[in-house]
């Protein structure tokens, strides 16, 4: 049976529109089940706690729980890789940081592309490192400390949480920026390194604010500067490195969310809206502040802002890592 031309065209147009209509209906119904957020490190660390604080509050906006799953190994790259390979439907997210979503690309040969295989959702928080030294260190400020390093080439020891960590890369950057040399002493995490600094077994650390500030307040170690661009709320009396005379020496200890590449724009928009709502909640902001993390400004919370920020961080830190010949474990 032949159909009239007008009837045929009408039916064809309707059939072509079906995928669009079903896609829109699916996106409107999202999420219809719990969402999984993968953390590349063990429970109890800052990445894990940040994921649980933000994810818990996102449930109020999405109407579905965020299930945090810890996938440990390869400096967080196993967890990120699982998200890359997941269905692009918004039901699996990657929470990452400077280490997992910037450094790892220079430290390892990854089976995925950090910029092209993940879809940005939102930047979450911004933290800082603090340059601290053992109590018996003769220098009392950053300028004097750098002078001491220059007067003692190769003698000083900086503890790090391991090869390729933020403090290790910052230490290499410090050497380059100040024309100094010192030894790196790797530890299995920031906690053991801080214990040895307090005991005087190593000379200095570039530690996270939550690791450093309790010991600073007890008078067990000396603070010199933070790596933030402005003074941090949890330690307003400690100058930034730039204020202390080391221009351009800053590193942000940030966290952000990604989805698999190809996730529909409407789904990304819903996830981003839930993040924005969560980060505006005073209770969430207070809990994150207790971890030494500050919520990023509202204009930094868009997917586009995260994409630009991540690329800028890669452009900045990959040359430092490669110039210092730093390798991942």
Image: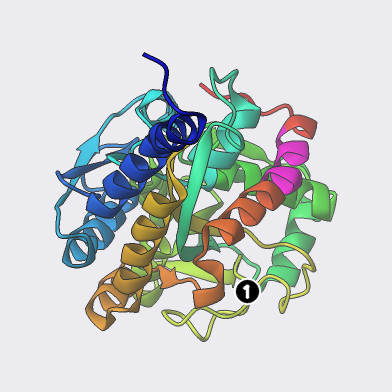
Q: Is residue 319 magenta?
A: yes
Q: Is residue 41 left or right of residue 305?
A: left
User: Does residue 158 appear in this view?
Assistant: no
Q: Which residues are magenta?
A: 314-321
Read off the residue under disc 1: 140
Question: Which residue is at the front of the view, 26 or 184?
Answer: 26
Classify mark 1: residues with Cα within 10 Å, few (<14), some (14-19) or many (20+): some
Is residue 2 positioned above or below 190 on the image?
A: above
Residue at the bottom extreme of this rendering: 237
Residue at position x 57%, y 80% in the image: 231
Q: State whether residue 285 is above or below residue 212.
A: below
| Side (left or right) of 32 relative to 278 | left
**Closest to the observer, 188 or 298:** 298
- Image position, residue 184 (x, y; %): 60, 37
Magenta region includes residue 57 = no
Q: Quadrant of residue 177?
A: bottom right
Q: On the rendered structure, is 108 left or right of 142?
A: left
Res 21 seen here: yes
User: Which SS class for mark 1?
Assistant: loop
Question: Which secondary structure is most common in the magenta stretch?
Answer: helix
Instruction: Place residue 284 in its image quadrant.
Output: bottom left
Place of residue 281 in the rendered image (x, y in percent of width and height, measured from the top left): 28, 79
- The quarter of the image holding the N terminus is top left
Task: Decide which of 271, 155 is in the foreground and name it.
Answer: 271
Q: Where residue 38 sits in the image (x, y, percent)?
A: 30, 38
What percent of the width, then of the height, locates residue 325?
A: 73, 27
């Amino acid at each position: 049976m032949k159909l009239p031309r007008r009837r045929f065209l009408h039916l064809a147009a309707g059939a072509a529109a079906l995928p669009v209509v079903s896609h829109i209906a699916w996106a409107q119904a999202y999420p219809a089940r719990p969402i999984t957020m993968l953390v590349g490190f063990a429970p109890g660390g800052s990445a894990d706690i940040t994921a649980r604080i933000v994810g818990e509050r996102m449930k109020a906006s999405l109407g579905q729980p965020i299930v945090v799953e810890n996938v440990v190994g390869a400096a967080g790259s196993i967890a990120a890789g699982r998200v890359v390979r997941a269905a692009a439907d918004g039901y699996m997210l990657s929470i990452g940081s400077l280490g997992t979503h910037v450094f790892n690309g220079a430290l390892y040969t990854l089976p995925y592309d950090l910029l092209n295989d993940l879809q940005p959702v939102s930047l979450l928080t911004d933290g800082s490192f603090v340059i601290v030294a053992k109590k018996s260190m003769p220098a009392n400020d950053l300028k004097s400390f750098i002078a001491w390093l220059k007067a003692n080439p190769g003698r000083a020891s900086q503890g790090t949480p391991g090869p390729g960590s933020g403090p290790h890369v910052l230490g290499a950057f410090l050497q380059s920026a100040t024309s100094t040399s010192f030894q790196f002493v790797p530890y299995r995490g920031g906690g053991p390194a801080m214990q040895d600094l307090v005991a005087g077994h190593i000379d200095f650390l570039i530690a996270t604010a939550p690791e450093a500030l309790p010991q600073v307040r007890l008078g067990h170690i000396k603070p010199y500067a933070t790596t933030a661009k402005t003074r941090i709320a949890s330690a307003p009396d400690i100058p930034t490195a730039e204020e202390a005379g080391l221009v351009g020496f800053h590193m942000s200890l940030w966290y952000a969310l990604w989805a698999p590449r190809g996730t529909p724009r409407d789904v990304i928009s819903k996830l981003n809206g839930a993040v924005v709502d969560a980060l505006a909640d005073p209770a969430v902001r207070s809990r994150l502040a207790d971890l030494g993390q500050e919520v990023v400004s509202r204009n930094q919370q868009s997917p586009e802002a995260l994409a630009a920020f991540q690329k800028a961080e890669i452009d900045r830190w990959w040359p430092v890592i490669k110039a210092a010949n730093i390798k991942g474990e």
